[in-house]
Structures are given as structure tokens and as C-alpha cells.
Amino acid sequence: MLETPLILAIESSCDETSAAVLQGLNVLSNIVSTQKIHEKFGGVVPELASRAHQASIVPVVEQAIAEAKVDIKSVQAVAVTLGPGLMGALLVGTSFAKSLSLSLNIPLISVNHMHAHVLAHFIQYKEAQILPKFPMLCLTVSGGHTQIVLVSSPLEMQVIGETIDDAAGEAFDKAAKVLGLPYPGGPQIDKLAFGGDEMKFNFTSPRLDNLRYSFSGLKTSLLYFLKAEMLKNPDFIQSEVSNICASYQRTIIDYLLVNFETAMKRWDIKNICLAGGVSANSLLRRKFLELGNRHDCATFIPEFQFCTDNAAMIGAAAYFKFQKHDFASLDCAPKANWSV
């Protein structure tokens, strides 16, 4: 097999159906189909997600192959997200990938979704690209996870800090729902915060030991704050929405970076990375770069297209497993919960 294998990657852990073709770590195509059906429900409905994946996976894979301009018979391995994620959604992707692996007689590579978010930094998509060096420290922030990950090599990772309840992305989305904003709420809060005063309101965030986070109390704090203010002024949210969004967003991001900075100092790491869907947040990106500059660190943030769920990151993670001939058997089962 070639050192730079041609890998077809599939991602279906939540509400994006994605397929990508990579030659080694070089992306030839990366197709993402986002499920719009969940918008009217204000969140992802698992059963609807799995049905949408079933409808989308064949055309998405066909489009990825066509855009990459390769023959599917030249693909040397098929990679797929095995977990964590929604069980029904994962089943669609893994079943398809197993069938393809069997029919083409090529290896199957199972990928941890959170592992792939970290390794999205090694996707090569432009010339003279600077890549992180090991060891590196990664803040991975998404709708389902908030983790500080110590990365010793592409296949050696240790979670050294994480949330004990809700994830930061969930804190954004649920706050947006309370504010009456459309789903997904995180980007809506980010957009509205541009015109707001981030110091106008104060929200509490608990300080826990061992680099742990907790976001459930922050959401409750916002809810009680809004109820109290609306008793005095029924139009409070409408008149103050930008200030509320700016203040709430600032609270979450400052909270994320306090623990991460502590980890940087404790492990004396000079390569720092940001990953996960929430890494698309403009304030988080800016403050993360500022943090790196203060500590003279090499700082890495993925392109927007590689922040949210996508198959290119699955292919990148699979590349490193391919080098070790770390292949999965066809009887592997999806894992709704699977730690890094």
C-alpha cells in the first residue's frame, strides 16, 4: 500500500452527513450536508437525524468521489466515525462504511469523533502550511463535549480537564432557545454579540478543581436573570438582546480560557490548539489567539470548514491509524459514548 493512501471518510455522528476523500492528509473533497429539519424543533431530534442520514449518505458519498475526481475502486481504505454520537445516526454511517469495505475488499478504519476534532489541525489544504508540534494542548469545545486534551502524538491523547455536566456548546444553544433565537443558537449569539456591551451584565460560573468545568449553573443563572428582569420590563429581552448575548458569551469564553491557561502553565506546553464546533465562535478565536500571544505559544485554529462536524477530519485521523495498520473488524459496533 502507498504511504499516502487514498481514503474515503464518512461522518454521521449527529446532524451532518459528510463524506471526504483524502490523499494522505491532503483533502481532495469534503462534502457536508446539514440537516435543516431540526430547526423547527430547536434542537436535534435523534430519530429524524438517522432518517435524514439514510436519505443523504449515498448522494453525499457520490458527490465526494466525483469532486475528488477519483475512481472509487482506487480507494484504499474507508474510514468512519464509530462514536461518540447519536446511536441511530452512527449506525447509518458505520453500516454504509462496512458494506463499502466489504464490497471493495479494503480495510475499515474506525475513528473517535473527538480524536478527529483534535487531528483536524493536521489537514493539509494549502501550501507552506505550518502544522502543530508535539506535545500540544487542545481545547475541544462542541455541542456535546468540553475537554482539555494533552496530545503526545497523533494516537496518544489524554483528557486532563472536562465538563462534569453540560458542554459549552449546549450552554450556548439552550441560552439562545430561552432568548427566542433560531437553532442552532451558538452562531446567533455570536452574531448578536457584535453590537453588544459584554460587560453590561454579570453571570456566575463555578470554579472547580482539577481543570473541571460546569455549565448547568450558568444556564440556570441566565434563566433566573431573564425572569426577574422581564417582571420589571416585559420587553427586556428584545431591548437588551445584544448586551445579553455579549455578556453571556464573554462569561463562557473567559471561563473556558481560565482553566486552559492553568493547564498551559502546569504542563508548560508551547503548542496550543482550538477545536470543535464552538471554535468557530469569533470571540473565542480572538481571545484564544491573544492567550497564545501572551504566553509566546504557537497557536492553531482550524479553518471554519474543519471546525464543525466534517468527514475531512475523520480522514485525517484515519490516515495516522492507516500508517500503523490499525484497522477495524467488520463486527465493530458504534459507541454512543466513547472517550478520547
Image (cartoon, grey):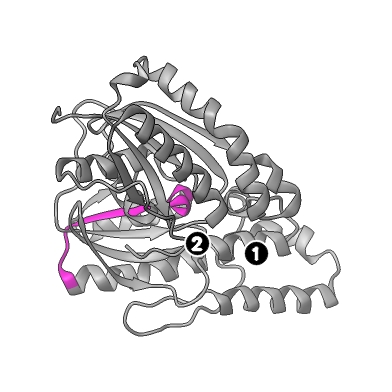
Under tag 2, what secondary structure?
Answer: loop
Q: Residue at x 21, y 48 (%)?
A: 326
Give the amino acid type for the residue marked by disc 2 in the picture.
Gly
Q: Residue at x 40, y 48 (%)?
A: 81
Measured as percent of width and height from the top left, residue 173 is found at 61, 59
Q: Is 326 placed above or below 172 here?
A: above
Disc 2 versus disc 1: nearer the observer: 2
Please name whichever residue, 169 or 320, is drawn nearer the observer in this view of the structure: 320
Q: Is residue 244 visible?
A: no
- Examine the structure image and report whether residue 98 is included in the region drawn in magenta: no
* Residue on which disc 1 sits: 175
Measured as percent of width and height from the top left, residue 227 is found at 77, 76
Residue 160: quadrant of the picture: bottom left
Q: Residue at x 28, y 64 (%)?
A: 149
Residue 297: quadrant of the picture: bottom left
Q: Quadrant of the C terminus?
A: bottom left
Residue bounds of the magenta highlight: 267-281
Task: Estimate how packed mark 2 is, as few (under 14), some (14 to 19) or many (20 or more) residues with alpha carbons within 10 Å.
Answer: some
Q: Which mark is residue 144?
A: 2
Q: Is residue 89 visible?
A: yes
Q: Is residue 182 left or right of residue 85?
A: right
Q: Quadrant of the N terminus?
A: top left
